[in-house]
Amino acid sequence: MVGDMKQVSLLLAPLLALAPACAVPGPGETDSSADDDASETEDSASEEDSDASQDETSDEAGTEEGTEEGAVCPSMISVSETENYSFESSLTLTTVPVMPNAEINFDWSGVTQDFREQTVDPTTDINMVTVILWGLSLSELEQQLNDDALNMSDLVAIVSYEPTGETAASMFDFTLLGNPVTPEEILPYMDPEVYPPDSYTYTTNVITGTVPSTGIRMLSGFILDESSENTDVVVDSSSTILDYTADLSSAPTLPIAAGEAEIEFDWSEIETNGLGQPFEATQITRALVAHYSVDTEELESRFLELETLADDLWEAEIPAGTSVMLSELMNADGDAFEGIDGEGTWIFALQCGGCANPAPWYLTVLSTCE
């Protein structure tokens, strides 16, 4: 591996409130010292203006409530932590000891299910395998992966391999940004005196796509052990274990207009995501709306199946910005989203595509307003 961080940084990124309008007082209310002989016509006009002003304020207060009779459903919604779900998880990596200063062989033929419990064909779904040396102990790495808190300063070196149907490769087959690296360049990164195992951990990441920071299907760890003669790292469906608890029921639902898609969702004001970590609005890369025939309790118990369990799902990529129109979301058939109804369970979610933890940063259950 070559520890040129300038090159490495190119390859990996860190895993309605409506204010009521002020009522304009009637001309008879502007001056308490008005002449006693003011015309009855002016007094009458003043009373009518005051009544109209009170009616207007009352109507606007109803709009603010959002669900009262006569309320108007908003066409622009600023989402917040209030209606966001909560997610707690614990990520564990299987880690094997390997011989230091040796050629290591990697085998990912056993990855038939990813850590999200989705089916994987290792011959067709795996487009990249990376090996990364982290300046972290195993426990530190697991915690930071779980919290999406990895920094570029944690990464020491990285090499990658792009298979074309094969499911195994030697360390010496890996490249840096597509450029071959020699054994003499790689082996110094396998020296336990320079990279002691209590402070440094290696991971093998099996990826769909060719962007190292996204599409991770499985991870496996290995550490240098001077007493080991093992030179094989086998990645399979049990290499990463993700235990989690998802709570979709405690937060209030978010009411939106039924059968309406011209609704803008803005997430620029959120400060904390559903994982309890800082919410960086510009890190959102995908928005989705999904419909289910099951209730929220079952969604909580099968949360890693969030997308495959959906009766239908509409999505949009977010290349930039902090808002999206629901009408921009499309399903797998290319049909645009047309609005929700009162049947089943509807959710709106925001995902960070460059994050190691697959849980959405924001997810709320939608309901209908009048």
Image (cartoon, rainbow, N blue to C red):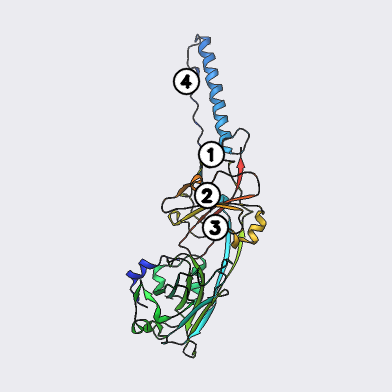
- Is residue 131 shown left or right of residue 238? left
> Mark 1 highlights which residue?
74
Front residue (pair 140, 338): 338
The amino acid beneath tag 2 is Ser
Three-letter amino acid code of the residue under disc 1? Pro
Mark toward the start of the polypeptide (4 vs 3) = 4
Which callout, 2 or 3, points at the residue further toward the start of the chain?
Answer: 2
Which of the numbered marks, if any, corresponds to residue 80?
2
Residue count near mark 2 (Cα–Cα under 10 Å), binned few <14, some 14–19, many ≥20: some
Image location of residue 60, percent across then percent down: 55, 32
Q: CA distance from mark 4 to mark 1?
A: 35 Å
Q: Callout 4, which amino acid?
A: Thr
Sooner in the amino-acid sequence: mark 2 or mark 4: 4
Question: Separation of disc 2 and disc 1 at Cα?
Answer: 15 Å
Residue 5 sits in which quadrant?
Answer: bottom left
Query: Mark 4 or 3, which is nearer the eye?
Result: 3
The answer to whether the residue labelled 4 contacts the one labelled 1, judged by CB atoms less than 8 Å apart, is: no
Do tag 2 and tag 1 residues touch (Cβ < 8 Å)?
no
The answer, for residue 197, to whether it is visible in the render is no
Q: Camera-side residue: 152 or 55?
A: 152
Label total for image: 4
Q: Nearer the viewer, mark 3 or mark 1?
A: 1
Q: Which residue has dot 3 on it?
A: 274
Residue 368 shows in this picture: yes
- Report the quarter where the N terminus lies: bottom left
